[in-house]
Amino acid sequence: MNLMDLYVAEVGRRLPGKTRADIEAEIHSALQDLLDERIRRAGKPADDEMVLAVLKEYGDPGKVAASYVGDHYLIGPKLYPTFVKVVFPVALFTVILVLSGLGSWLFLAHSTPGDWIQLVTQTIGNLIGSVILTGGIIALIFAILERTVPEFKLKKAEWNPHSLLRLKPRDRVHGGIPIFNIVLASLAIRVFNFTPITFWTGVTGSTAIEAWQCTPSCVTFHLLYSLSFLSDTFYRYLSALDVLWGLSLVLFVLLLNLGYWRTWTRWADIGLRALSIGLAAWMLIGSSLIGITAADLKAAGFPAVASLASPSIDLLNQLVRAVLVLMIVLSAEVIVRQLIRLLRRPEPLP
Amino acid sequence: MDIDGSLDNLVLEFRRGVIVLGVLSQLDEERYGYALINRLKEKGLEVDQGTLYPLLRRLESQGLLESNWRIETDRPRRYYVLSKAGRELLPRLTTEWTEIVSSMNKMLKGRGMP
């Protein structure tokens, strides 16, 4: 990809998809006209310096994109493409989550066809609510970023086209990773904060586990979906977790929008990973995050062999601890990788 | 108070309105963006690409211009020209402009105006 293509792509990724190709073609044509004029005046073939001068004359890609979109928007041209990339996977994941819950419930519960109709109707209503709420949270975050983060305001400083040359393949942010992290963080915030304890009740409208004549598997399913297996200790960590998820969301939205890792985004990632290590270690040494006891399981008639109730709880506790240890190891690995990248300093711009 | 800054902003506002009329007045025949910039420059109105191309698209979406892509010297160029609505609007807009200029001249006579 040559410099001119890179520039056009930088403008294009900030434009709405409907008009992107057409505007890109027009900008490319305009740049070529400017270059032809310079070639004619210089009386020599085009070289990189000439192309860079043309790009500098055309201006900052962000400003160029903004001039096509105007300034009456909730989410502006610099963030809009990222917003679209994020909101659809999150909405899709929410739909899959809720529908899988519905499917599992219909499969596990001993309910009648009449109950199914009621359940499906309630689920559709709640599904729409869930998608709107989750989408609203994301839109709100983007709108706040748009108005608060200087990166998204039109820069007054002179744009340097050499910055296009400094973009290395290793610094490129591949969309899948930020989108995955954004989906996880959005859903974590949504599930743990906006569906108090009884998530399943929120999804189906069912008010009591007994209403659906649960089988033992169904009891387990309910415990998982309602999050009522989590202890009060877990909810004491929730504020800190919210901060971590919120900051992760902001960082990965910024990364997705920037398209490339910058020094400050790497340091921000290191900071967040360090925070998550600290939090995971804090949770590891604290009280159990599991709120149910062997007696609760026995009372619910699960597992079928009563003597297995206590080992089941132990196993669950060990599983949680293993997840926390895994989080610490993975975060430490990312920190090391980011530090190595930071040590390879880019060459200064001319 | 920053007089120069205020002057720049006010002149920018003038130009925004004037550029629309200037552009429409030069598109009675087909022109592509860069040729139009040069044409306006020859007539004494400097417009940068970042202003012109989005403006052309806006005028087209308002139905005042039409455009088509054409391959010339081995590469595509987008040509703009007044649409039927644009041709009807231009004389009326010109009349409005002339009246504004006339009124302003009367108001400003003796205040730096001959």
Image (spheres, coloured by chain):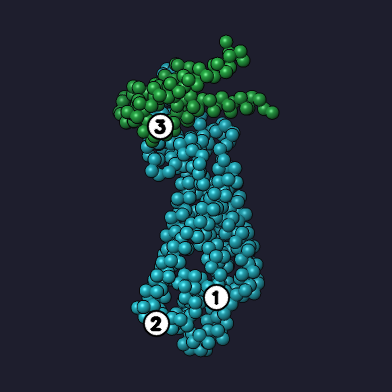
Chain colours: A cyan, B green
Tell me the quarter of the picture where residue B86 sits.
Answer: top left
The circle on residue A110 is: 2
Q: Residue at x 50, y 21 (%)?
A: B100
Please name whichever residue, A279 or A131, is drawn nearer the observer in this view of the structure.
A131
For residue A72, side relative to residue B72 (left or right): right
Q: Is residue A295 above or below residue A179?
A: below
Q: Which residue is mark 1?
A: A228
Q: Which residue is mark 3?
A: B59
Amino acid marked by disc 1? Ser
Q: Chain of mark 1?
A: A
Q: Residue at x 44, y 33 (%)?
A: B54
Q: Is residue A260 visible?
A: no
Instruction: Identify the image quadrant of the C terminus of chain A.
Output: top right
Please name whichever residue, A136 or A105, is drawn nearer the observer in this view of the structure.
A136
SS type, badge 3: helix
Q: Residue at x 47, y 29 (%)?
A: B51
